[in-house]
Image: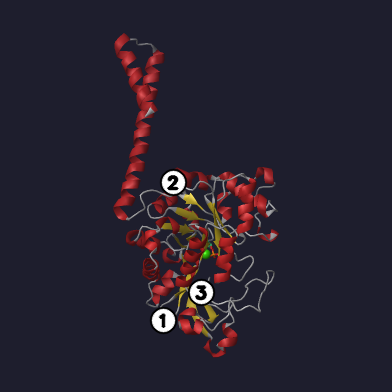
Amino acid sequence: MCVFINFTTTAMLYLKTKITNKIVKSLLLGSVLLLSASMAACLTACQTAQQASDDFQRPAENRKFPRPIVIAHRGASGYLPEHTLEAYIRGMELGADFIEPDLVMTKDGVLVARHENEISETTNVADVFPKRKTTKTIDDVKMAGWFVEDFTLAEIKKLKAKQRLAFRPQMDQQPFLIPTLDEIIDAVDQYNTKTGKSIGIVPEIKHSSYFRSIGVNMEKALLNALEDKKWDKKLDQVYIQSFEVSNLKELATLSKYHLVQLLGDPAESPYDLKGKKTYADMVTLDGLKEIRKYAQVLGPYKKYLVVENAKSEMTLVANDVLKNAKLLDLKIIPYTFRNESFFVMKPLTDPVKEYEFFYKIGVDGVFSDFPDTAVKALKMGNETIN
Ligand code: G3P
Ligand code: CA
């Protein structure tokens, strides 16, 4: 708009006085060029937005957050075994704005929270069902174990969830159960009713292509579960994530939930785009434009956002990924923030400083195993916390 006014004023002056000196001519030429460039940029942006709205049922606009949001990653998994109701509730109590269940499906079609469909690392399934071990190939990886899709919900409820990591509190005397998505949503509803908060969920669909290959549509099951719980009316409280792409594109045609494109190792590909596109391709400007057609949020590993090999905290800086994402109104929520020093991104060593750095460069949220530390760092930056 400013460019247009400058152009008009300059042109009128030119006509009125018929001044032909070189300065005015070059001003006029510059204004015309600027106007053309801004019109072209506007057209491209409008075309992109139009194309997106033609293809997908998107939310009217991307949600605005007054400050970075805190997502309790697998619940408050730094303190309690991941993906248990206890861990999710602790996450909410510690100040998370959202909790994050990873989802897989039982033999009888119930969505439950586990990070993998092979469940021996996070449950006592090997003790309870020793004869049910089998071998499968999941996303091209051959593995032996116990797979959630081979067990009914009643069988899954006989298991105890356990701590995955040896250096975290084991709490193996407590009977942590594996929760269903329904139970997780009920827990969030109860907590919100009790506190007046509007905490949301960020469900991640695990192994979408694999489940399709055995006849299971995780996406439709998730949409149905949300609708059954009347969460289809809570669009601002649901962000659906996946490392795959085609399922997110499909969800964009089927629903209005916000969608999160997760990024794995740069050299790897989303399983459904194997041999076609790597995650490194997806963070180029063209790659981000493609993502923005169907998703509102990018969920990269945190190293994606910084210039590599910084020698000191002073020289640690953001790269162009975040800047380009912001140009496209693509929110950025990196993973995973953890208190243990060996998880803190080098050259940083202090987890609070790590959050502060990412808040400063402008991320829109964080996936954290320790939501209280993420909140503490927000408060130190004088962010408004409810
Ligand atoms: O969903 C964000 C982050 O959780 C992705 O990694 O492996 O912990 O599910 P993962
Ligand atoms: Ca996850």
**Nearest the camera: 223 or 199?**
199
The location of residue 165, given as percent across then percent down, is 65, 71
Identified by mark 3, the residue type is: Pro
In the picture of the structure, the residue carrying the numbered disc 1 is: 108
Q: Is residue 224 placed above or below 3 in the rendered structure? A: below
Considering depth in this image, is 156 or 301 the residue closer to the camera? 156
Residue 179, label in figure: 3
User: What element does badge 3 sit on?
Assistant: loop
The earlier-in-sequence mark between 1 and 3 is: 1
**Residue at image point 47% right, 50% down:** 331
Q: Is mark 3 within 8 Å of ligand 2?
A: no
Is 148 situated left or right of 123 in this image? Answer: left
Tell me if label 2 and label 1 are in contact, CB under 8 Å: no
Q: Name the residue under label 2.
A: 329
Tell me the amino acid under the disc marked 2.
Answer: Asp
Q: Residue at x 32, y 55 (%)?
A: 57
Dot 1 amino acid type: Asp
Whichever of callouts 2 and 1 sits on the residue coming sooner in the sequence is: 1
